[in-house]
Amino acid sequence: MAKFRDIINYFSADWKLSIFSIAASSIYELVDLVVPYGIGQILNILSNQPLDQPLAEAIAFFAKITNYPVNNTLSLSVLLGIIFIVTVVKAPTQPWLTNWFHWDIPLRARRDKSKLAIEKILTLPLEFYDENNPGRIAGRVARGISNHTWTYPEIAGQLIPKLFRLIGIFVVILLIEWRIALLYLISFIIILGFSLKQLQRLIWHESKLDKYMEDTESRTSELITNIKTVKAFATETKELKRQKQRLERELKVVDYRIHKGYVNLITWQKAVIQFCVFSILGLTLAATVAGRVSIGHFIMTLTLSSMAYAELEPISNLAEVFARRYSSMLRFHEFLQEPIGNESVGVLGEENEPISPYKFTGKVEFAHVGFSYDASRQVLQDINLLIEPYQTVALVGRSGSGKSTLVKLLLRYFEPQQGQILIDGQDIRTLNVGQYRRRLAIVHQEVDVFNGTVLENLTYGRPNATFAEVQEACRIARVDEVLQQLPQGYYTVVGERGVRLSGGQRQRLGIARALLVQPDVLIFDEATSSLDYESERSIQLAMRTIQGTCTTIVIAHRLSTVRDADKIVVLDQGKIVEVGSHEELLHHEGIYRRLHSLQETGELLE
């Protein structure tokens, strides 16, 4: 659970610079108080009233070392010199000692935390992405980092230094007239205390709003991703109505609860502040008439108190802004605290380490493997399977029989709860997961394609592949036939998610990409189930060309894809029920023969 401390620690890498810049800003805020003090002392000189004792002693010391006589001219010159130093001389130094660091620190923190967020995205387990769609994740990261970046200059550069200015003003007024200082202190405690209490309530509403906004953005992302389905079923009106309802819900929270709450708070603050300013005017005037306060101190006290109460509005605005951003910043830290799981430890290797030090023969063994996604249903039960090097093994069975789960365990997307998986006799859990996966390759039913050129997608898993190797992989996967149809060949941009390629073309590209990494184990996960006959036939020919070059595991619904496999493994309800070649299994009165008969007669296989 993320806490306020996590927001503070966001900038911990530069804590020394933070303290320095905040201290410098606070000092500059306090130095600004010298101007109204100096103006007040000038008025005392002009009205023939005495100067403050410390200032009179300082002027006398200056007269002694310069051999000038102590008079009004010298006193006015010293005061003007002090005001010149704290205004004109201070001006060019302040931006570099304050503003530079107030932006330099959060901008570098944004870079560092963006790296952390990308690392988290790359290492989170698959089940996290089953529960959170891309729009929700991207929105949480973007808002969190953006709000941290914009909040730091406001808090470190304005809010904290302004609070020091308020304290400085209180000390100065206390030295002049304690009664006025007491009213000043009490009024500020009441105003700031009540404001903070109201802000706590508004932060709760902000948290609610942040979740509502995530829901809206998440659905919008889904609509963009699935726009073809929306149009195909003509559900635009229904989707628009649903999003309108979400937006109305957001408006009610942000307008009638949050915004109205801030307006009520500001109204109350302004009324109380003006009453306090008037009260201090009356008290200061009474003290001046009674002779306890000089004319210069009267003007200085009114000026300083007006400055102090004037700071309350920007302080309140800054607190309001922080309250609005607080929830999204916390949710960003909650994302960073998501556990990555044992199966993701080690997936990020050295930046320049694309080649795995492992080299396997491709002998894979499942020994008494059991697995379940939840306690209610066992997905795999006591799986025992030996795959010899360079064998082609097919996994078949009804949907939900555990075929894809078996492959996910082999790729270490999940860890088995019982038993172990061995490659060349080594438990795969003892291997570096990133380096281990580089020796495997998989072609999914839906091949993921990045928005770039065909060549960039082909070499994604092995950027240093030679062009001759790329051409050979394309020949085996029959991508060379596809390239002839593309306007710029290898350098054709395929678009977002490969929208400019057909399903069959993406499959062939996926096979060539997998071959280029020269894997020890190659997996086809229902690579032909959604293709037309011609595309399926091309993929099957490519798969036959690969047979015998590495260990190959094929998951298939269409049994025509697996006829030539060395071994066919039939799963049913998480168990291996049959093992053999195509011909051997057809001679058994088992599930495989029944599935084969259903497909031969044209019935659907489920």
Image (tube, helix red, strand yellow):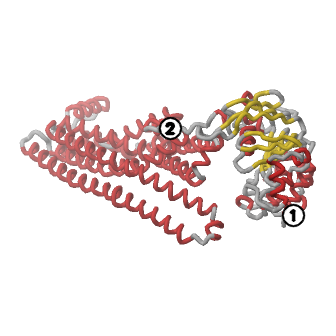
* Residue 425 shown left or right of residue 159 in the figure: right
Identify which residue is drawn at 88% across, 43% down: 392
Horizontal side of 45 relative to 62 (left or right) equals left
Q: Position of residue 237 (x, y in %)?
A: 53, 72
Q: Secondary structure at mark 2?
A: loop
The mark closer to the camera, 2 or 1, is 1
Residue at image x 31%, y 41%? 165
Which residue is disc 1 drawn over? 534
Along the viewing direction, whichever of 461 and 527 lies nearer the viewer: 527
State the image quarter where residue 260 is shown: bottom left
In the rendered image, the residue lying farthest to the left is 290
The dot on residue 497 is none
Q: Is residue 253 left or right of residue 451?
A: left
Label 2, label 1: how many angstroms apart (C-alpha)?
58 Å
Dividing the picture into quarters, in which one does residue 59 lie? Answer: top left
Residue 189 in the image: x percent, y percent? 24, 41
Within-10-Å neighbours for mark 2: few <14, some 14–19, many 20+: many
- Residue located at (27% from left, 56% from top): 264
Give the label on residue 11, or none. 2
User: Where residue 479 sits: x, y (%)?
Assistant: 87, 57
Q: Amino acid at mark 2?
A: Phe
Q: Is residue 435 above or below residue 483?
A: above
Q: Quadrant of the C terminus?
A: bottom right
Residue 223 appears in which quarter of the rendering? Answer: bottom right
Residue nearer the viewer, 219 or 145: 219
